[in-house]
Amino acid sequence: MFERCAGACGAAAIALAGVWSSASGAEINISAHRALYTMTLGTSRTDSGVIGAQGAMAYQWGETCDGWTVEQRYKLRISYAESQDVSIDSNFVTWESKDGLRYRFNQKETRNGAVDEEIRGSAQLDGPGQGGLITFEKPQPQTMKLPTGALFPSAHTIQLLEKARAGDTFLSRQVFDGAAVEGAVLVSAVIGPKVEPDPKDPLKTPILQHVGWRVRLAFFPADPVAEKPDYELGMLLLDDGVSRDMVIDYGDYTIKAKLDSIEALPKPAC
């Protein structure tokens, strides 16, 4: 299910506010940006049937006066040994309020040129640390409860950065991203040691000259008795919210996303 990476990859670069003070008092400065990634097949087990993957992802996170807008588009062609290649084209757009309580999402995906899935709706929490409600407009009107303590992707990323800054190594929370027709899912994160910026980074841009942490996120299905994650996402998460590179692990095969270019976006005149 590569399409679920839309919300997961986006979670790596969305933030609750441009400047946010953590529990330790240290400010976390998040950089709005536009980035392009090349996607290729990483590893593949023989019995997976996957023999190749090639594509690209464009990711843009912009700031408005009252929230953050995210536009993520990717095209990926997956080749199989004994079946037809599959071409996936996904467009995922979200808006999240800076207080982390309101969220809108819109996704459209095609497979081999035919519309495979359209998801649109909104969600709202009753308050910080409280539950809330998801309202789906597509594929069909329905409502779903958000559990107490659930987070949207931005607030989750902020907590990851706070934990990393504090030297903690684990975070497990319920997160709702709107990339699939289900409620909040359990996301367990393992945070590795701090990684200093590389002065020889070939992209040579200030937005990448930040410390970061190797983070691995495991996304479990909505079924509360599930013991194994649907997939895992590994990345180098910089302290300004940028994902330097990513690896999406589906168990039988992995997809690598390599950062090719990135530019900072201006702040709004509020």
Image (cartoon, rainbow, N blue to C red):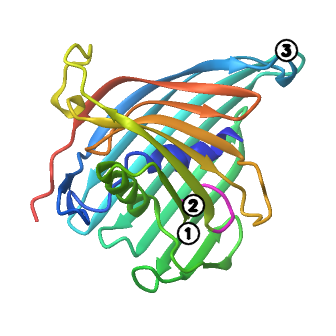
Q: Is residue 54 left or right of residue 264?
A: right
Q: Residue furthest right?
A: 82
* Snapshot quadrant of residue 66: bottom left
Magenta-colored stretch includes residue 178: yes
Q: How many marks?
A: 3
Q: Which residue is mark 3?
A: 81
Residue depicted at x 23% and y 45%: 31
Q: Is residue 4 left or right of residue 12?
A: right
Q: Which residue is mark 2?
A: 178
* Snapshot quadrant of residue 260: top left
Q: Residue furthest bottom?
A: 126
Residue depicted at x 33% and y 47%: 61
Give the Cα distance between marks 3 and 2: 32 Å
Identify the secondary structure beneath mark 1: strand
The local crowd at label 2, few if under 14, some if 14 to 19, many if 20 or more residues have their Cα within 10 Å, is many
- Mark 2 touches mark 1? (CB < 8 Å): yes
Magenta-colored stretch includes residue 181: yes
What's the magenta region? Answer: 177-183
Give the Cα distance between marks 1 and 3: 37 Å
Q: Quadrant of the C terminus?
A: bottom left
Q: Position of residue 119 (x, y in %)?
A: 62, 60
Q: Amino acid at mark 2?
A: Gly
